[in-house]
Amino acid sequence: MRTDKRQQINDFLWWVLLIGLPIVTISGASWLPSLPFWKGSVSQEIPSGLNPAYRYRFPETLKGALNPKQALQQEIAFYQKKIGLSPQSSLDRASLAVAYLKMARATGAGSWYLMAEQAASRSLADLPFNNNAALIVLARIAEARHDFTTALARAKQATGDDAIAIKVTSNLALGKVKEANQAAEALVNRIPTLGSLTLRAMVREAQGRDAEALQDYQKALAAEEPGEVGSSAKTRTYLGRFYARRGQLVQAKALYQEALRLVPRYPLALVYLAELETRQKNYQAAEDSYNQVSVYSQGAATVFDHIVDRGKARIKHLQGDAQGAKEWYDKAEALLRQQTAVGNVNGGFGHRRELARLLLERGRKEDVAEALALMQAEVKIRRDAQTLDTLAWALSNSGRWQEAGKVMAEALRWGVRDAVMFYRVGAIEKALGNRTQSDVYIRKATEIDPTLDAVTGQALGLDMEIFN
């Protein structure tokens, strides 16, 4: 019973990812997609360079484990059958919505999110009181749409750990780090689990409390239990990202590989591994990782599609293949424009920030005005540091350096230590003629990530003219 409770708490971690990654637009949500789920044999070989404390401690649970997708299909079929026998059972319909949501987290396929929303909405309409599960599902769907005000309103109506978790993630997205921290502390105080500790680690990252964030990640792994392999892989992936952003690439790579050992072809770990390989000029290895994400989905639309396309475009650009880069950028752009279209009939899971970043990274002058307009609209609903950084990027490319500096001051106000952001402030100060201050910020950037130079900066989509 305790393990089930822990798994319920850990389930919310996927929604942290959804704040940064859009749900893709798909058509037709009345079918059940037949997708491969984490195919591949589980390796017993421990990744080279992995800190022994980060090794998964329950290898026996990986042998002959039940295919998670099959278990979820059984759960979905169970509730569908119950509803077939008792169509008025609103609680069963809410449970079905939760099952759809679990499948969405597992596969990344947009259709499952839409089915979850439909089932939860129907359940709540029929049973508007004492229907916590339906409220949580709808709150998470609102969060995925970047409607954080609605997500928080739903969370306030609900109870339990999931409701607190939504207060963490939505407040982070709104730039309300103090409120997010309060919720994260409350969640850990209720029950310190793999999931709650990982979420608090992310909040502490947003505050620049790196040592405490690392401690929370380590505590999270120490608290993991058998049977939560998916959450264990997520936490290792986020910890790998923490190390990668600080230039500790050997440890980051080992953590991504350990996550993939637990969950073969885990898309989140694959895209971060591909980014790391790109930084190290291992272009074929990076492309192989991106291709595994595509193979995993077998053509079904997922939250990772535009990331794969943009990553491949970046590889082609770094290899000097202008035509290849253009083709992949165009593909990613077409997908993102479909997602961000006004009045999208498939659910409105758009992502203006990602489209703006693509336009800016591609480097065409004619795209800058649109990127700026996209970000001016986005910051009205989301003001986390990454969103403000993108707005500052667009303002800088528009020659509006004073405004860019003010936006970056807001982005850094909670103390986040991000090499890319410090680099951007350095570029802004240089443009304003403040060379000494520029040097200070560039030095801070390279102290945080010693690998940040002209090559790695390009791989991260930065204009590295300061290093020239």
Image: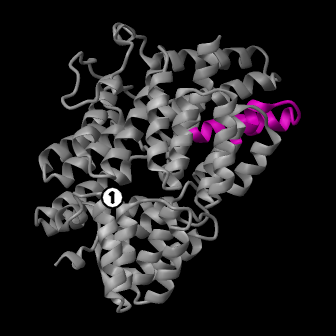
Which quarter of the figure is the N terminus placed in? Answer: top right
Q: Is residue 317 above or below residue 371?
A: above
Nearer to us in this view, 259 or 52: 52
Examine the rendering and report whether any part of residue 360 can be seen: no
Nearer to us in this view, 208 or 34: 208
Q: Residue furthest right?
A: 129
Q: Residues within 10 Å of mark 1 (few under 14, many from 20)?
A: some
Q: Residue at x 51, y 46 (%)?
A: 202
**14 in magenta:** no
Q: Position of residue 94 (x, y in %)?
A: 73, 28
Q: Position of residue 435 (x, y in %)?
A: 31, 87
**Dominant SS in magenta:** helix
Q: Quadrant of residue 258?
A: top left
Q: Quadrant of residue 461?
A: bottom left
Badge 1 amino acid: Ile
| Residue identifier under label 1 | 448
| Segment colored magenta | 113-138
Q: Is residue 61 above or below residue 465?
A: above
Q: Residue at x 41, y 87 (%)?
A: 398
Q: Position of residue 38 (x, y in %)?
A: 36, 26
Which quarter of the figure is the C terminus placed in? Answer: bottom left
Q: Residue furthest bottom?
A: 433
